[in-house]
Amino acid sequence: MLRFVAVRLSLILVTLLVVSVTIFAVTEMLPGDAATRILGQYATEANLKYLREELELDCPAPVRYLDWIAGVAQGDFGNSLIQKRPIAEIVGHRLVPSIYLAVFAFLISVPTAVLIGIWAGVRPDSLGDRIASTIGTVGISLPEFVTGLFLMILLSATWPLLPATGTIPRGESPLTSLEILVLPTLTLTAVVFAYVMRMMRANVLEVMESPYVRTAILKGLPMRRVIFDT
């Protein structure tokens, strides 16, 4: 297990490194530079020279990239050119609500998907199984933004039960604005539920077809024990 986790983390780090190098290289190939875009109509030679020295744009590209990597390793992601604030502060402000969304979606979708997947797997081709399979297929087929848009139209426009958009005030806990988190949580829940339910159903069907389960059922063992003991 430790080796599996280590391999996965290594792959994530390599992927992030490749993506950062690619974005940096593409940005370098674009016409102009950050100083030109920041100054705009005030981009005189003197202003450009001063800003490029301040932003260290006069250094070679590999040196600037390595400096950025060194800063990231220390938790310094640089400053946003648009908001004039540290990027770590901007990401941190949005990270807490994202964690809450992930936790809420996990706590709702996984237990529900496991139970419905087991129920559908032990009753194949029943009406409930067909309904669950249809919901799972639709949930996997629809992109998240389509599911979110559909829920916004249904629960915010057609039936004004929840706010379609909203932001959590700076410095406040997401728990004080739960109504804002309901729609995105439902969107994430729908996607996770579809994947977990279909996977659970397939696994239960496979186990139910195994010889030892059939033998247990033929010997009169209660279905509840068959399901939860196997």
Image (cartoon, rainbow, N blue to C red):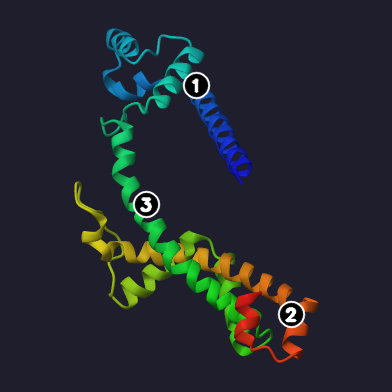
Q: CA distance from mark 2 to mark 3?
A: 42 Å
Q: Are marks 2 and 1 in contact (CB under 8 Å)?
A: no
Residue 48 image position (x, y, % from top left):
32, 12
Secondary structure beneath dot 2 equals: helix
Q: Which residue is mark 3?
A: 98
Please tell me which residue is depicted at 50% across the width and 25% down the height of the picture. Answer: 24
The tag earlier along the polypeptide, 2 or 3, is 3
Q: Which residue is mark 1?
A: 28
The tag earlier along the polypeptide, 3 or 1, is 1
Please tell me which residue is depicted at 78% across the width and 76% down the height of the picture. Answer: 210
Lateral position of residue 142 relative to residue 100, left or right? right
Front residue of 96/114: it is 114
Q: Which residue is mark 2?
A: 213
Residue 189 image position (x, y, % from top left):
45, 66
Residue type at mark 1 is Glu
Q: CA distance from mark 2 to mark 1?
A: 62 Å
Secondary structure beneath dot 3 equals: helix
Q: Quadrant of the C terminus?
A: bottom right
Badge 2 density bin: few <14, some 14–19, many ≥20, Cα 10 Å: some
Q: Quadrant of residue 11?
A: top right
Instruction: Examine the rendering and report whether any part of residue 32 can be seen.
Output: no
Residue type at mark 3 is Ser
Lateral position of residue 13 relative to residue 64, left or right? right
